[in-house]
Amino acid sequence: ADFVYADGSYHITYGDRDYVKSVWNRAGVTESGVFHNFYYVTSGNGVNWNEYLIDDSGTLYEHEFWTALVLSDGRPLVGMYKYAQYGNVYNIGSTVLLAEWNGASWKKSIITDTTYPDTSEGMGLGLVVNRPGDYFAAWDFSPPDTHDDEFRGRYGNIALARSGSDNKWTSTWQIDPFSLEGKAVLQIHGGKLYFLALGDYHDTKIYFREYEISQPPSPPPPPVPDFKNAIAPQVFLLLNN
């Protein structure tokens, strides 16, 4: 799934092939789908490995296999797209599981909206660490109805979210009013957040976005800046067009 090498240690996530379930495909026909348990392994020499089970819910689907792995103060922070079907419709009801290793166990939470059943949120998940406890994520947010007036894109939505001081991931921002069509890549450097991904099923291109995140809100700044107030005007650039 993902691979990170840092400070002399190897970090890998992957899925096995443990479940076969009957699912609806995009054409509305049932078929057999393979689902995975989700694992994390780490090694200091690339020979001897320590393995940890992250999730055994059987919701990591072979055709919607979206995961993310970053390190926070040397500890793994892992995201997984939990596939679901609601009302016998392909890819409806999906969520994002976030798992953070505390040294002894995984602290797990669902970081997307679960207040209504027909969501479709989290595909293409990307993660980045600003500092320990302060994380950004981007994902596709394109259900038939978002139940959110700030996400009403004609061709879907790409969401950017920040963990917040309460770690509830309630602060979100619409990057673009169209769908994410691949994995979001996020980086932070010099007080700026960079986003790169394939987007817009209607007119697909690679999109690059740059956000200033070092500028605090004013006046007065809270202890942990509110995400929407902390984001300065974006710099929008479009590649290969």
Image (cartoon, rainbow, N blue to C red):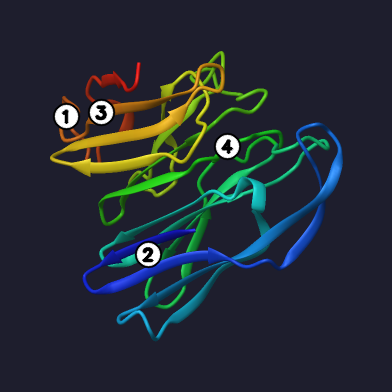
Q: Nearer the viewer, mark 2 or mark 1?
A: 2
Q: Nearer the viewer, mark 1 or mark 4?
A: 4
Disc 3 versus disc 2: distance between alpha carbons? 25 Å
Answer whether labels 4 and 3 touch (C-beta < 8 Å).
Answer: no
**Amino acid of disc 1:** Pro
Q: Residue beneath label 1, please?
A: 220
Disc 1 versus disc 4: distance between alpha carbons? 33 Å
Q: Nearer the viewer, mark 3 or mark 1?
A: 3
Image mark for residue 210: 3
Q: Residue beneath label 4, please?
A: 121
Could you say which is closer to the camera, residue 4 or residue 228? 4
Disc 4 versus disc 3: distance between alpha carbons? 22 Å
Q: Earlier in the sequence, mark 4 or mark 2?
A: 2
Residue 160 coordinates in the image, percent (x, y):
40, 33
**Amino acid of disc 4:** Glu
User: What residue sits 51% from the left and 60% below the top?
Assistant: 108
Q: Is residue 192 left or right of residue 59?
A: left
The residue furthest top is: 154
